[in-house]
Image (cartoon, rainbow, N blue to C red):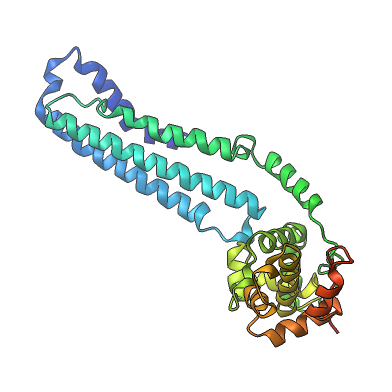
Amino acid sequence: MHKKDLIHFIYPVMNLVLNLVQKYVPILENEFIEDIRFISLIVFFLFYLMLSFNVLYKNLWNESLKKSIAIAHYLLIRNWTVFMFVIATFLVFRVLFSLYSEKLLDELFRAHNYSVLVIMPWLLLYGKILINPEILHGYPKLKKRLIKIENNINFTDHVWVFDLKDISNPQDKILSDSIEERVVPYITEIENFVEKENPFRTPKFSFADFARAIHIPTSHMYYIFKYHAIVTFSEYINYCRIKDALKLINDGDLNTLTLEGLASKVGFSSYNSFLTAFKEQTNQSPKDYLSSRSNMAPLNINLAFK
């Protein structure tokens, strides 16, 4: 803390001293002084609430993901600060409402009324700590957990390559300095999102939609698919849809769906496009796969694009 920051404590300390002195100096309990205090307290609380919002928005909430050390770390801190700001805002308005009620009752300003409401945000805070305990340990603890997750990700699909290809584009060379150390976290985010959300079941789910959904800058996503994937994005979409279809088949969804219905469910616009993609990636037609399925384990597909 700098010495100039002490100026922010002057007003709170003055109010505290006034509260203490009023007990012994009755003249300070007059209505004029209390009116001035009431107005000044409102201005004080609202001013610092807006100031806090401005600092957080400019320095954290509006920060480009390109500048963040790790996306997961940045999002954790951003979500926590938003949560804490909401709690602080609730407490500010609780105090202001308490002061207003004391003014109506001609009581000295102590902000004691409705103090039971303070319990609510504290319960929310404790609950959030139980859900996201990493905030207590900081970045090293979070990074350790992320590395563990990354090491458990199965990259046997042969979609991704981690040896950097030759970069001839000057802009890509500049990007590589900031992206290369994030390749594994980025691919982890991509794989986990596709596995959990099946986004490509939506036929018009675009490249921009995909990047936005997993909080990766579009330029970074282009870089990943250009230098660390053996397929284009459209090929990756078909690949994920066929994987999804195989999983649904193995889970028994064809008990209630036709092959045409399955194609539509996983995001293909027509059965013919589904048939073509299925043959490309499995070297079998859907009917051939179904007929041989009873004598084989669920199929683990590898891309076979020509």
Relative horizontal placement of residue 265, taking residue 180 as reference (left or right): left
- Residue 164 in the image: state x and y as whole percent: 85, 68
Q: Is residue 1 visible?
A: no
Q: How many marks?
A: 0
At a point 27% along the width and 27% down the height, the residue shown is 15
In this orientation, which residue lies closer to the viewer: 14 or 198? 198
Q: Using the image, determine if residue 213 lies above or below residue 119.
A: below
| Residue 175 picture quarter | bottom right
At a point 32% along the width and 45% down the height, the residue shown is 47
- Residue 22 in the image: state x and y as whole percent: 19, 18
Relative horizontal placement of residue 265, taking residue 172 as reference (left or right): left
| Residue 216 picture quarter | bottom right
In this orientation, which residue lies closer to the viewer: 149 or 50? 149
Taking the view exactly as shown, the residue that stands out farthest to the top is: 24
Taking the view exactly as shown, the residue that stands out farthest to the right is: 295
At a point 19% along the width and 39% down the height, the residue shown is 39
- Residue 259 in the image: state x and y as whole percent: 70, 78
In this orientation, which residue lies closer to the viewer: 36 or 284? 284
Quarter placement of the C terminus: bottom right
In this orientation, which residue lies closer to the viewer: 198 or 62? 198
Q: Is residue 43 visible?
A: yes
| Residue 280 picture quarter | bottom right
Relative horizontal placement of residue 165, taking residue 70 as reference (left or right): right
Relative horizontal placement of residue 270, taking residue 12 as reference (left or right): right
- Residue 243 in the image: state x and y as whole percent: 75, 69
